[in-house]
Amino acid sequence: MLLWNMLKAFFAPEGKYPPAGLPSVASVSYLAITVFIVGKSLKRHRWYTTNEFYPVVRKQLTVLWIMEIIKIVFRWCTGHFSDLNSWLPLYFCSITLFAGVMAGWGKGFVRRIGLVFMMTGGMVGGALFLTYPSSSILLFPAFHYQCVHSFVYHGCMVYLSALAYRTEAITLHASDFKWYALYTGFFCALALGLNLSLGTNLMFISKPFKGTFLDWVYQLLGEGFYTTVLILMHIFGPFWSMLLIRNKSHLLDPPMQQICSEPLA
């Protein structure tokens, strides 16, 4: 009976229990656990090669898609079928699911597009979420599938992105911006079209997620200008910020390069 009650609480409908909130003990705890696991995993796999990287991508993407499908079914079963905002994977972080498939199973330029987004948008989106997890934790209690899913998913985004750099899956160049802009711009255009025709708020480009720091930005800029600024941020910000970090620091270098870059005593 106890196990059954715990399971019901774990998949409780939105609003049945008070949300964990932000900031909270739950958000800090989730962050600490996620950072610890990602750090330990990267240390354990620090000598992985490129050929060992792709099976990891395929395994993790399989798990992440299963978790995403469970999330979608949960939202359908709790009365949100018509609310596309709550289950359609069409947000900046969600499109890493498609990029991961392209990186893990694609070939040629298809694989490169997936890797470019994973190593830029995936890293920035995952890291920003972990430091400011403004989604499920504002809607559900700490012990809930949606919250667990959110931190597992974004932790995997950071891990796979860092592992791609460490294994030198590709070397990121300024010329790769065309692939990043093409991929991100396609999903921004798709989301904006659905938002305008269906009244949704996919990619959060029409209005911010309620209760986040972007509320004041929306109030300051107004709807039209806010949408323009958000789309431009999606298309330009993550790629160029990660390329700058990659070129100016050794943080994401393969382990042997990190050793060689250390100053001699």
Image (cartoon, rainbow, N blue to C red):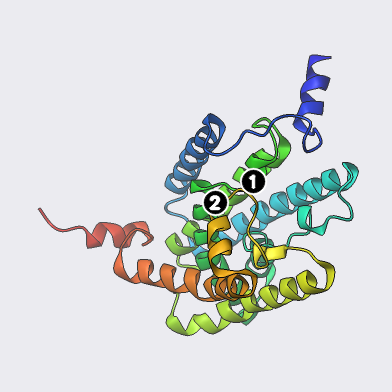
Q: Which of the 4 image quadrants contains residue 183?
A: bottom right
The image position of residue 13, as x and y in percent, is 81, 36
Q: Is residue 51 left or right of residue 206?
A: left
- Numbered label attached to residue 129: 2
- Examine the rendered structure and indicate whether residue 104 appears above or below residue 152: below
Could you tell me the amino acid type at mark 1?
Ser
Q: Which of the two residues, 34 or 93, is positioned nearer the viewer here?
A: 93
Q: Which of the 4 image quadrants contains residue 101?
A: bottom right
- Numbered label attached to residue 150: 1
Is residue 230 visible in the rendered structure shown here?
A: yes
Q: Which of the two residues, 134 or 176, is positioned nearer the viewer here?
A: 134
Q: Residue at x 88, y 48 (%)?
A: 76
Q: Residues within 10 Å of mark 1 (few under 14, many from 20)?
A: many
The image position of residue 150, as x and y in percent, is 64, 46
The image position of residue 138, as x and y in percent, is 64, 41
Q: Residues within 10 Å of mark 2 (few under 14, many from 20)?
A: some
Could you tell me the amino acid type at mark 2?
Phe
Q: Secondary structure at mark 1?
A: helix
- Determine the CA span between mark 1 and mark 2: 9 Å
- Examine the rendered structure and indicate whether residue 249 appears above or below residue 65: below
- Examine the rendered structure and indicate whether residue 53 appears above or below residue 189: above
